[in-house]
Amino acid sequence: MLSCSSGRGLLLFAVGALHVGLLFEAVGADSAGPTQEALNSGRPGSDRVNRFPKIGAAIDYNVLEGGQTEVPSVVGDVTSLETVGPRTFRLHCGADVLQLDFYRTDVVRVQMAWAGKFEDPASADLVVGGPTPATLSASVEDKGDYLQFQATTPGGVAIQASKMPLRLSLLWGGNVIWTESQGLARNSTSTFQTLSAGSGKEHFFGGGMQNGRFSHKGPRIRISSDGNWDEGGNPNAVPFYLSTAGYATFRNTWSPGFYDFSSAPLVLGHNESRFDAFYFGAEPRNFGALLEGYTYITGRPFMPPVYGLGLGDSDCYHNDRHGNDTGVAVAVAEKYRQEDMPAAWLLPNDGYGCGFGLGPTSFPKNFTLLDEVVLELGEQGFATGLWSSAGLPDIKRMVQGSGTRIAKTDVGWIGDGYKFAFDAVRMVAQGIENNSDARRFIWTVEGWAGTHRYAVMWTGDNSGSLDYVRWQVPTFIGSSFSGQAHVSGDVDGIFGGSPESFVRDLQFKCLMTVFMTMSGWAANPDKQPWAWGEPYTSIARMYLKLKARLTPYYYTLSRQAYDTGLPPVRAMALEFPLDDRFLEHHVGSAQQFMAGPSILVVPIYQPLSTTALRDEIHLPAGEWVDWWNGSVYEGPAVINGCPAPLERLPMFVRAGAILPMWADTPMPYSAAAQSDPLILDIFPSGESSFSLYEDDGRTRQALEQGAFARTLINCSGPAPRASSGRVAVGISASVGRFEGQLAQRTYLLRVHAPKSPTAVLLRHHESSTAEALPLQGSLSALDFAPSGWFFDAAQLQGVVHIKTPPQASSIAFAVELEVSSERQSSVQIVI
Ligand SMILES: *[C@@H]1O[C@H](CO)[C@@H](O)[C@H](O)[C@H]1NC(C)=O
Ligand SMILES: *[C@@H]1O[C@H](CO)[C@@H](O)[C@H](O)[C@H]1NC(C)=O
Ligand SMILES: *[C@@H]1O[C@H](CO)[C@@H](O)[C@H](O)[C@H]1NC(C)=O
Ligand SMILES: *[C@@H]1O[C@H](CO)[C@@H](O)[C@H](O)[C@H]1NC(C)=O
Ligand SMILES: *[C@@H]1O[C@H](CO)[C@@H](O)[C@H](O)[C@H]1NC(C)=O
Ligand SMILES: *[C@@H]1O[C@H](CO)[C@@H](O)[C@H](O)[C@H]1NC(C)=O
Ligand SMILES: *[C@@H]1O[C@H](CO)[C@@H](O)[C@H](O)[C@H]1NC(C)=O
């Protein structure tokens, strides 16, 4: 460590020693001479070695030096039962006391106080959900050998506690899910639980961000803050896991731990002399219910502002490379506009050798200049944040005065992780929210349970390569499976990189919620999407535009995560839990994901020099439409040989999908989270619906005052391959209001259908009026016309384009299409 030449490395240790409370008061390491010197060495232009050398793997805290093992002490027989409250019981086992608390019918908390001493160091920060309903009560029944506890409301979880000795079992719907094969135990390195696994078929997920893994029957996973950003590291671990057997466990602790699911019995330990676990029950494989329970207790994932869904660009502008001028950020923003690339926010570096200002001063703090930069970026439609190595002592001035809205709590000031890092992120969230009406938008690393309430968690300082693309995919689907709804990694890493890996990484990140580039530390230092020239620039532009178009889809998914804990980026196993193929780690489960319910994304991580084809794409049951050419596949199936030239990220749309999209605009992220026109890309198949979410895009009114609107869009239609049949699309009146809401807008429907309609009617049920929309001669004629329709047979094997006149958002309306086909049946579209 002492030989480390990195400014960031040194700073980590310097700041780690500070109390986090000082971060906003003291300037921290920024004011400390020697550290500053260290920061100024090894600056941009140098590669990873100089920025932040990889810290070795976490110490194996539960193995004593010399490899000795201890005989654990195990809890003994139940000596008495105490009823503490209407939903709380205590089992005395000699001096040791086990407490059971029901929080909901499906949530029970179990705490062990060795020698009767209860400690609760984590609840104040991690547990935000209280018992509900407030009247919840629980019962205990003496069954002879054992006691049975459960909420008095029927259904839900039950705990059985055998008396001699004390062994717990968890039940759901009367069935035992697990039984302790040994009582709760402790040795000098951990308090651990030993569970008989239900069967060899049980699978485990969760654990937060476990780089390269999402399914955990292999080697045990470390639940710790280990500063290892590479595959095998766990930069945002969470003391939480889910089982296919119908339960999840959250260990309410700040201590590092390990979960060993490799063989029966399971061993789950944390380095502390206490035990505190919340158990969540659900039907087997109902992971959505378990995530809802977990995020009920630990809080819901934060709701990003709309600019959070666009590309962020970060760099150390006040440095030699940029002429020591933070104002360069404005030129970068201009370049995005010139390049016609819809990025959303800039993150000038305020630490790691930089400040904000103009001129050769080290760590300048020129607020006049910052004010100007934020204003000018705002005029170009960008939000601005700051990225600091040592705390944000001036956050009030920055947010209230300059108008910054984003922050990154980088490795330099998250200390050794755990509570320190958690407190840092919480303080920054308050720094943003106490000083403005904005929503928090923060990036961090070394998150823990509950960090999902505050921040995006990212994979740390990575080196860009195709292999990086490969291991990130299971990483992200595993962390979002743990309640971390918004996760990412720097596009093509902060170090390394190549044009090919840049494009491949950007492509799939355009199908996630959040992403950013970080320039300045790679050999080819600029990570902007035009950095590699053609054809890479055009491909990057195409994907950035696709991402911007899909904003209403991802924004709605983000709100769903905020309401229920279900993340936008979903493991195949999370979206299709009953398909056994997705439970274990292999290409078809770990290297593809669902973007919400409707888009299957298949990232490419093999070099084009090896193959331009992608194998082993696993389609779930149902019908899937190839994004690029409209071909329909019947699942379950495995697709091999799917073409994947550089410009093509294989994607498949689930039949029935309704994808709300924005039209292309130069500054899509600068306004409210709504747009006129609204595009609806519709893949009819049976009955389907989408409840579109919209709000002002940036303030907390949506979250605190219910200022948002929902618009139900539904569709019924024939199977995708049917050559004809009735298709109907319904759009209800918007429910809810927010400031700046559009009173009316035009809808552009793109209905995927193989045949041309003969007529299109717009109908309002309330007034019983129907109006025929005019057929236009071409797509461009439709563009210029106030309304109408056009059938493009060449596009994706048939798309009906329909443009409505502006429609009031408060009124439901309808369109009907007559479609002639060989069989003379009709297709009707009701809007
Ligand atoms: C484990 O806990 C012990 C006792 O609290 C502590 O001294 C030790 O530093 C901890 N180890 C780790 C890796 O946290
Ligand atoms: C304590 O018990 C855990 C669980 O069996 C084990 O992994 C760990 O190595 C033990 N520690 C010692 C020092 O024996
Ligand atoms: C930037 O500032 C540093 C001192 O902080 C100085 O050494 C360097 O020459 C300056 N570079 C430019 C281009 O002004
Ligand atoms: C701070 O920036 C402003 C605006 O760019 C400039 O006019 C002023 O001279 C700067 N102050 C210092 C001390 O550099
Ligand atoms: C934000 O406001 C809350 C409530 O007034 C206060 O407790 C907290 O200390 C403030 N935090 C910051 C960083 O301003
Ligand atoms: C569409 O692309 C797929 C590969 O994803 C290919 O198998 C299929 O033949 C293509 N369909 C058409 C009509 O080109
Ligand atoms: C949409 O849902 C409403 C309410 O359930 C229903 O009355 C209507 O028929 C549906 N429309 C379509 C096109 O599925």
Image: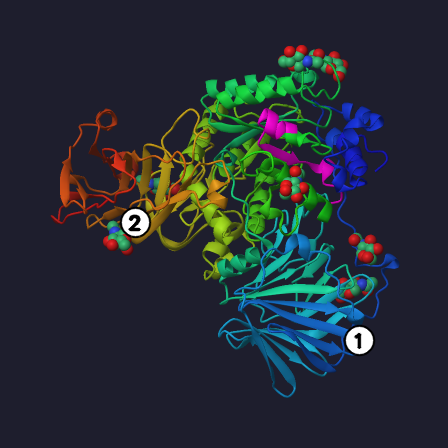
Q: In the rendered image, which quarter contains the N terminus?
A: top right
| Residue beneath disc 1 | 95
**Which quadrant would residue 389 be assigned to in this image?**
top right
Where residue 578 sits, quadrant-wise, is bottom left
Q: Position of residue 675 (x, y in %)?
A: 37, 33
Q: SS for tag 2?
A: strand
Mark 2 or 1, which is nearer the eye?
1
The amino acid type of the residue labelled 2 equals: Asn
**In this view of the protein, which residue sits in the foreground, 180 or 162?**
162
Q: Is residue 46 visible?
A: yes
Camera-nearest residue between 778 and 404? 404
- x, y percentage for residue 106? 54, 67
Residue at the location (19% across, 47% down)?
Answer: 766
User: Does the magenta portion include 402?
Assistant: yes
Amino acid type at image mark 1: Ala
Dot 2 corresponds to which residue? 714
Residue 284 position within the rendered picture, expressed as x and y whole percent measured from the top left: 50, 67
Mark 2 and ligand 7: say if the CB distance to the nearest ligand atom is below 8 Å.
yes
Question: Left or right of 288: which side holds 802?
Answer: left
Q: Marks 2 and 1, how far apart in space?
A: 61 Å
With 727 as the anchor, is 3 left or right in this view? right
The way the protein has been coloured in the rendering is rainbow
In the rendered structure, which segment of residues is drawn in magenta? 397-418
* SS for callout 1: loop
